[in-house]
Amino acid sequence: MDLATKLDGGATVVVIDPSGARRSLTATLGMRLFVGSDPSAAIQVIDPRVGPGHALIERLGPGWIVTSLDPANPIWILDDTGRPVPVMEQLGVKSATLLAGSTQVLLYPPVSQESR
């Protein structure tokens, strides 16, 4: 096990659907999470504004890479003022609140196992 893997306790993704129901996922280093309406998506979103392959969220290093896969209908990120801004190309973030249709996807930074 390399040092990065040893120190990485995973990072949390919280998905909040329009009804307020929450579910959490732990993303390990290198994990790729597809967001979309397809039943095989790691983060399935049932919303007419979300296509089968809507976005890709990758857990890399100390943060995340967010990529919209449908340029005509991108995933959105809330800026520092809470306004939604479309993700038009790859975007690296340490933490973020994303919007896929009316579903929120909260990305949290990793927790090192040493701090547990």
Image (tube, rainbow, N blue to C red):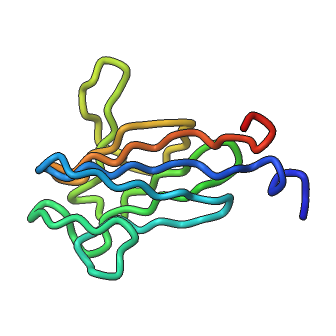
Q: Classify residue 100 as left or right of residue 68.
A: left
- What is the total number of numbered labels drawn onto the structure image? 0
Residue at image x 54%, y 57%?
Answer: 26
Residue at image x 46%, y 44%?
Answer: 107
Quarter location, residue 5: bottom right
The residue furthest right is 2
Residue at image x 74%, y 50%?
Answer: 8
Q: Is residue 104 above or below residue 68?
A: above
Question: Residue 96 at what x, y percent from top left?
Answer: 43, 37
The residue furthest front is 116
Residue at image x 26%, y 49%?
Answer: 16
Question: Residue 67 at what x, y percent from top left?
Answer: 44, 56
Q: Is residue 31 above or below residue 99?
A: below
User: Which of 110 and 98 lies nearest the eye of the viewer?
Assistant: 110
Q: Classify residue 69 as left or right of residue 47.
A: right
User: Which of 98 and 28 lies nearest the eye of the viewer?
Assistant: 28
Quarter location, residue 46: bottom left
User: Which of 103 and 83 lies nearest the eye of the viewer?
Assistant: 103
Q: Classify residue 27 as left or right of residue 33.
A: right
Question: Residue 22 at what x, y percent from top left?
Answer: 28, 51
Quadrant of the drawing holding the N terminus = bottom right
Question: Residue 66 at what x, y percent from top left?
Answer: 47, 52
Q: Is residue 17 above or below residue 44?
A: above
Q: Is residue 26 above or below residue 78?
A: below
Quarter location, residue 69: bottom left
Quadrant of the drawing holding the C terminus = top right
